[in-house]
Amino acid sequence: MMFYIRRIVFYLVTFWAAISLNFLLPRLLPGDPAAIMLGKLRRANGGRPLSEETVEAIRSILGAEQGMSLWDQYRAYWGRLLQGDLGVSSTRYPASVADLIASALPWTVILVGTATVISFVIGIVAGAWVGWKRGTWLDHLVPVTTVFQSIPYFWLALVLVAVFSVQLGLLPIIGGYDVFEFPAGPEWSWAFFASAVQHAILPAITIVISSVGGWLLGMRNMMVSTMSEDYVVTAEAKGLKPRRIRGRYASRNAMIPSLAGFGIALGFVVAGSIVMEQVFSYPGIGKLMIQAVQGLDYALMQGVFLVITLTVLVANFAMDLVYGFIDPRARHNG
């Protein structure tokens, strides 16, 4: 019980620190980010004056409100967060930051999350088999997948585009769906779903090829180490079936360290794959972040960084609980 209490307290403190840092950073920047953003909003609005509510909202997010102490600003900031108010984007005015993140988040979560799970499953299953058959020709899979992992991400993506899109014409080059077939944007239909899946194949393959080598190598090494443990040797001496030894004794214990890494990988799913999304112009969080940085959209940058940070904390907290459940040693040592 104390293990779970300590983990909950730790993540609550980290959660508070992340939000507090997100509040302080714009106020520590040189110059006046609020004035910069208001100027961009006026230009985006055709030079017309902004409403008083918009000016106050921008200054409350990025600047010092008139007559308010830092503590009062901090309390107001928490109040807006609890209401889901992350401000207004200057590059896509008058769209709210929360709406932009909500529209980009499903693309990243579905694509990167699915590709991460597929990569993890392939790596763990293949790594367990390679470790079980150590010393055979299967060991050659390790250097092959490691080479793919060491290839620069953007180069691999461009090669896949050149082969499957340009040369063979089998898959789309950019985007998350066919904008000519669906000019009004995403919709709930089988035709749109098919278009989205077709556009997601190349980005997903890029992620899987680039990441499966790490899972395979880690699982293979842990499998080899686990095979020399006393309980595995004892199981072999008892004459248990090799399939049972591999599945119940060796693989189950060998994959425990990989679960911790999988939790971290799931946490960073929301961050997206910035390079992949940029190469394929995929409408996810990574591309949204690049647009925010290029456009000096402080409110959007704040919102994206906050969502990514909190998602990483939630994913790691969930994996800590799972890890403590499947490995009693973690509860006693934690």
Image: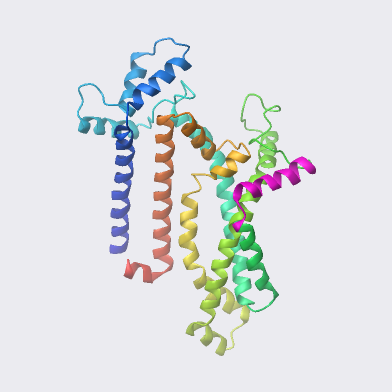
x, y percentage for residue 305?
A: 42, 40
- Residue at x 25%, y 30% (from the top left corner): 73
Question: Is residue 283 a member of the stretch shown in magenta?
Answer: no
Residue 1 in view in this figure: no
Q: Quadrant location of the N terminus?
A: bottom left
Q: Is residue 301 above or below residue 40?
A: below
* Numbered disc total: 0
Q: Quadrant of residue 80?
A: top left
Which stretch appears magenta?
A: 150-168
Q: Is residue 250 above or below residue 161?
A: below
- Residue at x 34%, y 17% (from the top left corner): 53
- Residue at x 56%, y 47% (from the top left corner): 112
Q: Is residue 260 above or below residue 241?
A: above
Side of 88 relative to 155 (left or right): left
- Look at the magenta stretch and give its main secondary structure: helix
Question: Is residue 153 a member of the stretch shown in magenta?
Answer: yes
x, y percentage for residue 306?
A: 39, 40
